[in-house]
Structure formats: structure tokens, C-alpha cells
């Protein structure tokens, strides 16, 4: 699953960093785990509402429910955790802790590069907690990257990806579950990671629909949000969108940045260099200065808009 590479790795790292700030559970121990990997104990996980400073604590209604949740959450095998989450949801269909279990299963499947399981468990997490931007953006990204032109349900998958990405953006300040004592800088880093993936996903959906103007706008937003942690894949996708719009100087600038921020000898850098060289030839072949006409021929095809997300 390509989303666990590059942007996906950054995303999971941000979630894990946020989890590290959670500390240990209060004595009452009725709160669920954080968004990242499982700590040794159940941390204090809450939902922050920045505008008011209030928090919503996810709680078990009974000690039996809490114990069942803790036993399920302790599993580290994604398939076993998914089965345990299903059993928990069947026994406690109204428990708000269902979302936490399915989200953890989703993250474990993401680490295992199992795209379809990410989508399946992520959808269940969304059904249990529709405003949490973490499963929303994970499912959106997985759908956008795994949908092919030959898929019979292509339009439905792309529509779902766009809907979830928009929902992640809309709920970034009110839906994200964070520990009560989390470092604000880590919370902001997690938000930036989510927004970057959401806008990148919208850009991929637009590219799949050949709406290059909208793709350019969304990918530019992804780049702007991620200024503090620039990623080659974002600049390469932005370059392809600008290329399609015949914005060759801008496309070359983005390709240059893609080369700059990629690691030597990686597939991502090779693709970025191909795009860079292609645009350099296009611009060199243009008519004399003052003639705005685009070149009549193009030396080669630009990279696929969804291909660059490859591991460093």
C-alpha cells in the first residue's frame, strides 16, 4: 500500500509522536488509547475542542466493557485485532470505544501494507465515530491510491475518497482525539499531516477525473500546509498538474523541488528527474520570448499523477 510510504509514513509517525505524549491512564481508567501504536498502558485520550477548551472523554459504561476493550486493544496482530473488534462491537453495539479498536486495526493493517483491510476497518471506525479525521483521511487516501480506471465502482470509490477527505478537513479541530496532556506542537504536527494527506487525496481524485485546475489548487494547498516538512511526492504531483495545464515554468519549479527533496537513487527521485528533464526540453523548445504559444510537441509523457508515492 503506497500510503504507508512517504506521506503515509510521515502521517503514522505524527500519530505515534502524539501517542507518546499520552502518559498513563488516570486512576479511573475508563478512557481509550491514542491514535498511534499501542502503549503499554491505556493512556488518557480525549477529544479537544480548541474554541472552548472543553474535552470529551471516551468512556466505557461498565467495568466489563472496559476490560473487554483493553483485552482487544492489547492484540498486536491486525487480523486478530479486527476479529476482537468485531466481537466487541457485537457485544457492545453502542460503545463509543468501537471506533478506537477499529482505528487501531486500521493502523496495523496500514503498517502491513494491506490497503483493502485499511479501507474495511477504517470504514467501520468512521461508522462508529464519523467526525474523527484520522480514519477519514486514511480511508480517503487508500481509496484514491487503489482505484483504477477499470474498476466498475471507480466513480463511487473516488466520490467516497473526496467526501472523506473533505470531512477530515472540516473536522480537524473538533474531531481529533488527543491526550489531555499532549504537547500542543505535536498536536499541530498531527493536524498538518492529516491536512496534507487530505488535500493530496483531493488532488489525486481531481487528477483521476482530469480536472487539472482543481488538482493544482488542492496539491498547492497540500504543499503549503506541509512547508515545514517538504515531500518530493507532493511537488512531483503538483508539477504534473501544472504540466497538464501548460504552466511549464511553474511545473519546472515544482519538479526542481521534487528533485531537491527526494533521496538520492530512489524511484521518487528518478521520476522527479524525468519530469525535470522533460520540462527543461519543453521550455527550451518554446518560441522566442514574447510568443506565448505553447510548444507544438512534447518530448515525452509526464509521470502518472498517482505513481510517485513510492518508498524512499
Image: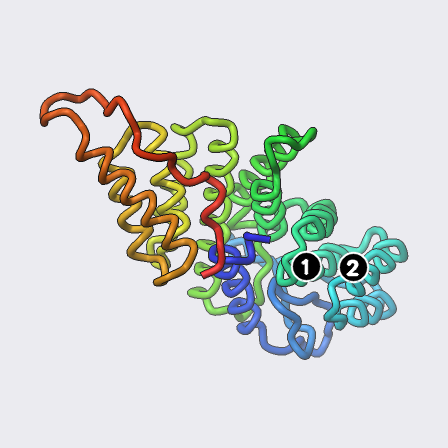
The residue identified by callout 2 is 82
**Toward which corner of the image does residue 254 lie, by quadrant?**
top left
Q: Secondary structure at mark 1?
A: helix
Asked which quadrant contains residue 283, the reply is top left
Report the label total: 2
Q: Is residue 272 above or below residue 215?
A: below
Residue at 30% of width from left, 29% of height from top?
298
Question: Dot 2, how many residues are within 10 Å of its Cα: few (below 14), some (14-19), or many (20+)?
Answer: many
Asked if residue 104 lies left or right of residue 15, the reply is right
Label 1: which residue?
Answer: 109
Which percent across, then down, holds residue 35? Answer: 61, 62
Q: Nearer the viewer, mark 2 or mark 1?
A: 1
Sequence-first tag of 2 and 1: 2
Is residue 228 or residue 230 the one in the foreground? 230
- Whether residue 84 sits left or right of residue 211 in the image: it is right
Residue 74: image x %, image y %? 75, 72
Residue at the (51%, 43%) spot, across then down:
169
Q: Is residue 257 left or right of residue 128?
A: left
* Residue at horizontal 34 percent and vertical 40 percent from the top: 239
Residue 229 versus residue 255 in the image, above or below: below
**Residue 230 or residue 2, whichever sits in front:** 2
Relative horizontal placement of residue 297, taking residue 168 as reference (left or right): left
> The residue tagged with tag 2: helix, strand or loop?
helix
Q: Nearer the viewer, residue 123 or 205?
A: 205
- Mark 2 touching mark 1, by CB under 8 A? yes
Amino acid at each position: 500500500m503506497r500510503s504507508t510510504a512517504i506521506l503515509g509514513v510521515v502521517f503514522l509517525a505524527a500519530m505515534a509522536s502524539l501517542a507518546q505524549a499520552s502518559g498513563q491512564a488516570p486512576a479511573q481508567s475508563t478512557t481509550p488509547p491514542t491514535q498511534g501504536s499501542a502503549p503499554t498502558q491505556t493512556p488518557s485520550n480525549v477529544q479537544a475542542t480548541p474554541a472552548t477548551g472543553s474535552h470529551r472523554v471516551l468512556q466505557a459504561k461498565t467495568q466489563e466493557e472496559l476490560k473487554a476493550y483493553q483485552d482487544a486493544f492489547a492484540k498486536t496482530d491486525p487480523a486478530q485485532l479486527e476479529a476482537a473488534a468485531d466481537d466487541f462491537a457485537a457485544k457492545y453495539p453502542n460503545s463509543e470505544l468501537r471506533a478506537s479498536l477499529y482505528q487501531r486495526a486500521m493502523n496495523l493493517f496500514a503498517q502491513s501494507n494491506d490497503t483493502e483491510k485499511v479501507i474495511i476497518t477504517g470504514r467501520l471506525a468512521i461508522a462508529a465515530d464519523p467526525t474523527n479525521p484520522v480514519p477519514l483521511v486514511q480511508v480517503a487516501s487508500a481509496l484514491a491510491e487503489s482505484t483504477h480506471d477499470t474498476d466498475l465502482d471507480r466513480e463511487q470509490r473516488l466520490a467516497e475518497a473526496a467526501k472523506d477527505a473533505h470531512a477530515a478537513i472540516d473536522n480537524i479541530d473538533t474531531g481529533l482525539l488527543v491526550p489531555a496532556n499532549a504537547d500542543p506542537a505535536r498536536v499541530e504536527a498531527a493536524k498538518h499531516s492529516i491536512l496534507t494527506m487530505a488535500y493530496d487525496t483531493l488532488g489525486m481524485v481531481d487528477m483521476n477525473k482530469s480536472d487539472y485546475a482543481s488538482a493544482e489548487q488542492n496539491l498547492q494547498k497540500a504543499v503549503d500546509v506541509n512547508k515545514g516538512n517538504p515531500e518530493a511526492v507532493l511537488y512531483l504531483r503538483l508539477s504534473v498538474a501544472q504540466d497538464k495545464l501548460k504552466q511549464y515554468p511553474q511545473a519546472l519549479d515544482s519538479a526542481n523541488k521534487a528533485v531537491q527533496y527526494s533521496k538520492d537513487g530512489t524511484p521518487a527521485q528518478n521520476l522527479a528527474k524525468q519530469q525535470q528533464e522533460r520540462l527543461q526540453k519543453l521550455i527550451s523548445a518554446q518560441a522566442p520570448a514574447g510568443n506565448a504559444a505553447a510548444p507544438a510537441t512534447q518530448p515525452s509523457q509526464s509521470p502518472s499523477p498517482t505513481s510517485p508515492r513510492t518508498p524512499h
